Image (cartoon, grey):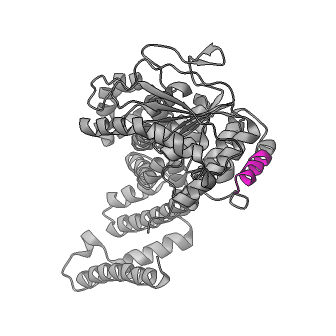
Amino acid sequence: MRGSRRSVLTAGQAWIFVLIIGLWEVLTAAGWIDPFFFSRPSLIAVRFYKWVTSGTVYPHIYMTTVETLLAFAAGSLLGVLFGLLFARVPMLARLFDPYIKIANALPRIALAPIFTLWFGLGILSKVAFGVTLVFFIVFFNTYRGVREVDPTIFNNARMLGANERDLFRHVFLPSAMSWILASLHTSVGMALVGAVVGEYLGAAKVLGYLIAQAEGVFDTTGVFTGLAVLSCFVLIIDLIVTLVEKWLLKWKPEIS
Amino acid sequence: MAPDGAEYTAIREITFEIPRGEFVSIVGPTGCGKSTVLNLAAGLIFPDRGTITIFEKNLSGINCYAAYQFQQDGILPWKTAEDNVMLGLQIRRVPVAKARAQARNWLSKVGLSGFENRYPHQLSGGMRKRVALAQSLIVEPEILLMDEPFSALDQQTREFMEDDLLSICAEYKKTVLFVTHDLEEAIALSDRVLLFSAGAGSRLIGDYRVDIPRPREVADIRVNPSFTAIYGAIWESLRGEVMKAYARK
């Protein structure tokens, strides 16, 4: 993209932000909507500033980051392994097909309390919950990536003497990688959702808890500030994902 | 098998033998099972009836003496030219430094020095073919199986590649089975040209010896009087088969 086009785009994005926040502020200031239910951007900004400068928010961010990364790593690893296994052994895929569909369609949120029961209030229950969300995204993408390997490339590697392990390393994984990375934005988001929802249900030092606690005392400003912190967190993670993606897919031609 | 799942017999009762070091081309109309023969010789597919014998042994898996040049790109798009060429050595557990040095050497042999770190999408069609050729040759195969490898290239690039192939074959004494729909190419490169009938159930209907002395130069060969004679003889039969293939469509 050309530099001038990009700066116009960024300006446009900034304007949308200003417009929504401005409207919110004006409407609450004029008394059209009740700040008790909707808070006010200026109050949120003050609270945000207070949290960041006093440092009270950092331990919460830290815990959420750890949970997100663990859930993401474990879910991706399991997803890649099973995706590969099922793609290479079609019998397994056929055998487990209905159960995978059921497990994927299950409303995961219903599992959260059970996970708290099983794994306790600590980090494990949140990670487990995040894994159930991340796993299926990565699993389906790996499966598809491996199944859609160009047969010519597959046969070429076989003619060069590749065994199953070589094929995995040189053909299947890199081929599936573009599929997995395409889903990375979604799966990282899901890992975060898993962490926050898990936290919501029971924890003492995490962002979800911070939001839940504020909600408990009808502190809407606290709720929105928590959400604002989460939004910043998501933007930063997404940026990192984009950078990783660019690096791993540098072999791909850029589509203009 | 045809796309609709019905049984389709591509080739039937074909027997031929290729002595070590000979360059043999297969020509025939579209859909005559030329590629099927290559896939059988490669060990990628197996015949319902009959056997493939490579150096006195029946073939029962991937043909480990052979390298395969595919019609489409078979090189890996996520690897640089150099990494592509060294793949065969990596698979054979050759130490990386040694494999890399050999890959560079082969890239320079096919005229791609300076392009080691390019990805396939950054190379032209001809360059990608050269990478594929180096990738095959680095594992020192005794047999080269080639499925219309130059058909997607423009005329000039094609002649360059054909000349390179001839000099490589002369230098390394490869046995080559070359499939093409281009009769000129077949004659220019080969010691023998096999003619297949129109499919389905294609048969071997001609086996022509090309007595044009080597070394050859593809551009000069077309004015050679024996070239014209052989071309005329094969085209006589090929034309009939091409007509039949069209009539069936």
- In the rendered image, the vertical position of residue B34 relative to residue A47, given as above or below: above
The residue positioned 52% from the left and 46% from the top of the image is B184
The location of residue A114, given as percent across then percent down, is: 36, 34
Q: Is residue A248 visible?
A: no
The residue positioned 43% from the left and 13% from the top of the image is B49
Q: Is residue B160 left or right of residue A233?
A: right
**Would residue B102 be counted in the magenta stretch?**
yes
The location of residue A85, given as percent across then percent down, is: 48, 29
Q: Is residue B134 left or right of residue B197?
A: right
Report the front residue among B165 and A156.
B165
Q: Quadrant of the N terminus of chain B?
A: top left
Report the front residue among B199 and B223.
B223
**Would residue A8 be counted in the magenta stretch?**
no
Kindly indicate the quadrant of the structure image that contains residue B240.
top left
Magenta residues? B100-111
Kindly indicate the quadrant of the structure image that contains residue A215.
bottom left
Q: Quadrant of the C terminus of chain B?
A: top left
Report the front residue among B198 and B233.
B233
The location of residue A25, given as percent across then percent down, is: 30, 82
